[in-house]
Image (cartoon, rainbow, N blue to C red):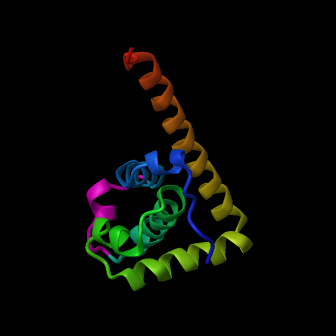
């Protein structure tokens, strides 16, 4: 399994921001993404969100599991491995992941720029 991104920018992409972006992309209620709903329309977006959290935030498997309905860390590992495998062969999935990653990274960059403008410098 590939190691998660551990850059300072990656740490600023929160679990909540990732969950919200994925829920909106798939037209889901945010709470439904987090709860123990195992219906097909929710499972794949949840797995995508777990994958993105791991790779863009660097959160541990147990941390991710807690934020997605108190799932066991092995469930999180399975989800991330599954999305990694599918990304290599499924162009549609790869495109969705690329779009979501770009959105989350650009949102973080915009927030950083706004904070740089609005945060007073210390003298």
Q: Nearer the viewer, residue 67 or 5?
A: 5
Residue 118 sits in quarter: top left
Q: Residue visible at 52% across and 74% down?
A: 80
Spot occupied by residue 114 in the image (x, y as percentages of width and height): 45, 23
**Could you tell whether 43 is left or right of 84 in the image?**
left
Q: Nearer the viewer, residue 51 or 31?
A: 51
Say above or below: 25 vs 93.
Answer: above
Residue 96 sits in quarter: bottom right
**30 inside magenta stretch:** yes
The image quadrant where one finds the N terminus is bottom right
Spot occupied by residue 31 in the image (x, y as percentages of width and height): 26, 58
Residue 35 sits in quarter: bottom left
Q: Residue visible at 31% across and 54% down?
A: 29
Spot occupied by residue 88 in the image (x, y as percentages of width and height): 72, 72
Q: Residue visible at 51% across and 60% down?
A: 52
**29 inside magenta stretch:** yes
Boundaries of the magenta span: 27-37
Give the tally of numbered discs.
0
Say above or below: 62 vs 92.
Answer: below
The image quadrant where one finds the C terminus is top left
Say above or below: 99 vs 44.
Answer: above
């Amino acid at each position: 399994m590939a190691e998660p991104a551990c850059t300072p920018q990656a740490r600023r992409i929160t679990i909540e921001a990732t969950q919200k972006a994925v829920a909106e992309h798939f037209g889901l209620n945010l709470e439904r993404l987090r709860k123990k709903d195992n219906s097909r329309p929710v499972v794949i977006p949840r797995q995508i969100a777990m994958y993105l959290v791991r790779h863009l935030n660097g959160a541990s498997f147990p941390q991710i599991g807690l934020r997605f309905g108190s799932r066991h860390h092995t469930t999180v590992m399975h989800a991330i491995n599954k999305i990694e495998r599918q990304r290599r062969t499924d162009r549609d999935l790869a495109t969705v992941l690329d779009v979501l990653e770009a959105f989350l990274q650009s949102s973080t960059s915009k927030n950083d720029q706004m904070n740089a403008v609005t945060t007073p410098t210390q003298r």
